Image: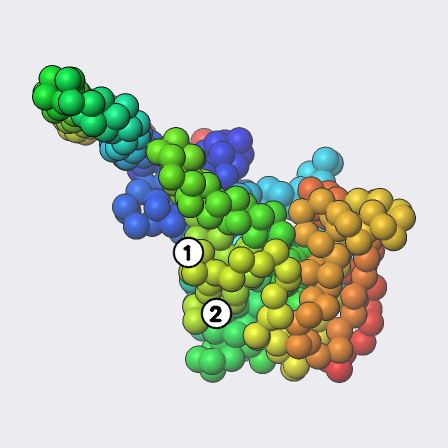
Amino acid sequence: MKKELRGVKALLRDAVHHGSVAVERVQLETARRPFAILEAIPGVKVPAAIVHVIHDASVTGTHAVIRAVNGAVHGLADKALVEVETVVPPTAPREDPP
Amino acid sequence: MGKKLDFAIGILNGAIGDHLVRTDNGLAIEMAFMKDGAQVAPADAAIGPRVVVLVHGLMCTESIWEFPDGDDYGARLARDHGYTPLYVRYNTGRAIFENGEALSTLLARLVAAHPGVLDEVLLLGYSMGGLVARSACHAAATSGAPWLPLVRRAIYVGTPHQGAPLERVGRAVSRVLREIPDPYTRLIAEIADLRSEGVKDLGESPIRGEDRVDADRAAFSLREPTHPVPLLPQIRHRLIAGAVGEEPWMEALFGDAMVPVTSALGRRTSAPPCEVTILRGQTHATLPHADAVYEVITEELSGGERP
């Protein structure tokens, strides 16, 4: 059962990590279009470019934090599982009554 | 583990089993013989001279064979024909040829562990299990594995010998979505492409590694492919197809709701003459535990020796 628990934990970590990478890419690509239009207008070109950089940095930063927290939670869960295994030893096979 | 948890893990393996293997995840199923939900090593399997190897299909476990009353084809074959049932459980998300090679190795270990005991091995595959059994035979023929001469018959139940159109349609839709220059449609395509190698293999049903189709370069065709590997001529093959309705148009259009009748009967496979049976009123879901299928199996077993 421990093997399965560790498997579920690893799967959740992978799902959050890959999900975050995919959503980050979609958010950056989605924002690129309106910013490209704004950056083509002479009057707002410079401020739009600045906001674009700030936007991209905040998106990238947010997802980096999500992935870092995910990694940390994974590490903590690993330690917790080791603790549980230490405190609760595997049950010995039950002997048949005489 | 409970049957429901086992079944859930079986579904997970079918969906992303290749990822589980690649990441060395503990949820990945290793191919093994199973008895009462526990693995049985080939050396520990109590077998008689005749064994039937039951290979389940995509996203399920050996519990798929169970009738509502707890009976199954293996138990019936033991009772009526003296076969020892060996239920195989495996990771259906791996490529078919990988599972075929693993099955061939498992059967070789069984034969080696019981020298002189085995007289006959009967292969019974449901859906993808039939392809895995065929792939194992091919691997055994190539490597000269000692169990292959013991196989006189192979029975395929609802096996998509020429692939399943649902996977080909899914592949086409995913490809169209990927071509649309929109991040959201591309994301949907990426999620669809997460499906396992085993699922992707069901498009063309390749039983050798070299016949596998790269989904990105696959011809944009929804037609059933001609299978490059024939059924082995030294084995008697029985192909059983289900059909959702009684009418011929229902049979032609829907097959057993998952596998077209032409694919289940291997009509475009360069096959040796083999017995085929269409069971009308049987869907893909009912085929692994249907009285009508067992009647065909019984008929096959009383149908004479190797041709």
- Classify B44 as above or below B50: above
Nearest the eye: B29 or B34: B29
Nearest the eye: B245 or B150: B245
Q: How far apart, in angstroms, are the residues tagged by discs 2 and 1?
A: 15 Å
Q: Secondary structure at mark 2?
A: helix
Label 2 or label 1, whichever lies nearer to me, is: 1
Residue drawn at x 43%, y 71% as measured from the top left: B210
Which numbered marker is on residue B211? Answer: 2
**What x and y, as percent, mark residue B297?**
77, 60
Judged left or right of residue B177, residue B224 is right
**What x and y, as percent, mark residue B15?**
46, 42
Judged left or right of residue B273, residue B269 is left
Answer few, some or many: residues within 10 Å of disc 2's Cα (few below 14, many 20 plus, some between 14 and 19): some
Residue drawn at x 54%, y 72% as measured from the top left: B137
Q: State the residue position of label 1.
A: B216
Single out the residue that lies furthest toward the front. A42
Which quadrant holds the N terminus of chain B?
top left
Q: Using the rendered image, report if marks 2 and 1 lie on a common chain.
A: yes
**What x and y, as percent, mark residue A65?**
14, 22
Q: Earlier in the sequence, mark 2 or mark 1?
A: 2
